[in-house]
């Protein structure tokens, strides 16, 4: 008997004790990375209010950041659809290849974004390296019909590569924060 048939709701979407522990570790890493900045960031967040996007600010961003943001949003939306759609069908395969392309462009464009660290790569580029290593493995495991590994890999990329980075992109002071809250 497979694990999926034993507990379909928990195993299908990967929400189990390991997922919760992983998210706790990620939250801890983010808290440590922010260090002493969390108090000023929290104070700035409390003063801010959501508003329509500041498109003038978006126009001033570099082309690499514009491509990165637009492709990342497309990958986030398509990834959400793929997480909820039926697997193994033609739609899943076509949308999956599209998502892989979007994720590849997102990761590739992030290599050109160095403004955060004065022209050098930052710690956030470790996510890029992780994505560029793991993404081909997810495709290989799909081709080999290793569904469990493929699912874990792609869900890890979606939640780790997009959900966590989405949170980081909206930290007070960053470009997306300024567009919507600044």
Image (cartoon, rainbow, N blue to C red):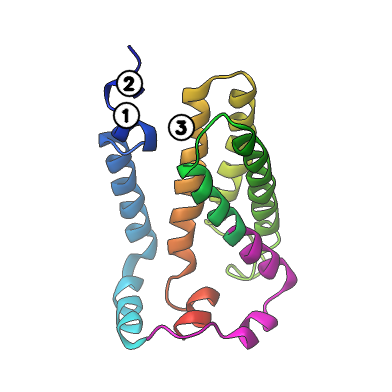
Q: Residue at x 32, y 54 (%)?
A: 27
Image height of 18 relative to 106, above or below? above
The rendered magenta stretch, by its main secondary structure, is classed as: helix
Residue under pointer 3: 152
| Mark 2–mark 1 distance (CA, rounded to whole Å) | 6 Å
Please give left or right for residue 33 compared with residue 100 in the image: left
Badge 1 crowding class, 10 Å Cα cut-off, few under 14, some 14 to 19, many 20 or more, is few
Badge 2 crowding class, 10 Å Cα cut-off, few under 14, some 14 to 19, many 20 or more, is few
Residue under pointer 1: 8
**Helix, strand or loop status at disc 1:** helix
Residue under pointer 2: 5
Residues at discs 2 and 1 in contact (Cβ within 8 Å):
yes
Q: Nearest the camera: 134 or 96?
A: 96
User: Which numbered disc, 3 or 2, marks the residue that appears first in the sequence?
Assistant: 2
Where residue 145 sits, quadrant-wise, is: top right
Quadrant location, the N terminus: top left
**Helix, strand or loop status at disc 2:** helix
Q: Is residue 146 shown in magenta?
A: no
Q: Residue at x 47, y 77 (%)?
A: 177
Magenta residues, start to end: 49-72
């Amino acid at each position: 008997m497979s694990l999926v048939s034993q507990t379909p709701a928990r195993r299908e979407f990967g929400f189990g004790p390991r997922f919760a522990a992983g998210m706790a570790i990620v939250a801890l890493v983010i808290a440590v990375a922010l260090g002493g900045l969390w108090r000023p960031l929290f104070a700035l967040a409390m003063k801010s209010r959501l508003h329509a996007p500041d498109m003038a600010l978006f126009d001033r961003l570099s082309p690499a950041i514009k491509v990165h943001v637009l492709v990342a949003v497309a990958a986030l939306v398509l990834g959400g659809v793929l997480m909820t759609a039926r697997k193994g069908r033609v739609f899943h395969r076509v949308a999956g290849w599209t998502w892989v392309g979007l994720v590849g462009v997102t990761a590739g464009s992030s290599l050109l974004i160095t403004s955060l660290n004065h022209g050098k790569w930052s710690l956030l580029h470790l996510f890029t390296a992780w994505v560029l290593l793991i993404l081909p493995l997810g495709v290989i495991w799909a081709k080999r019909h290793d569904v469990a590994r493929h699912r874990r890999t792609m869900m890890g990329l979606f939640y780790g590569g997009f959900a966590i980075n989405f949170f980081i992109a909206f930290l007070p002071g960053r470009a997306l924060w300024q567009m919507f809250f600044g």
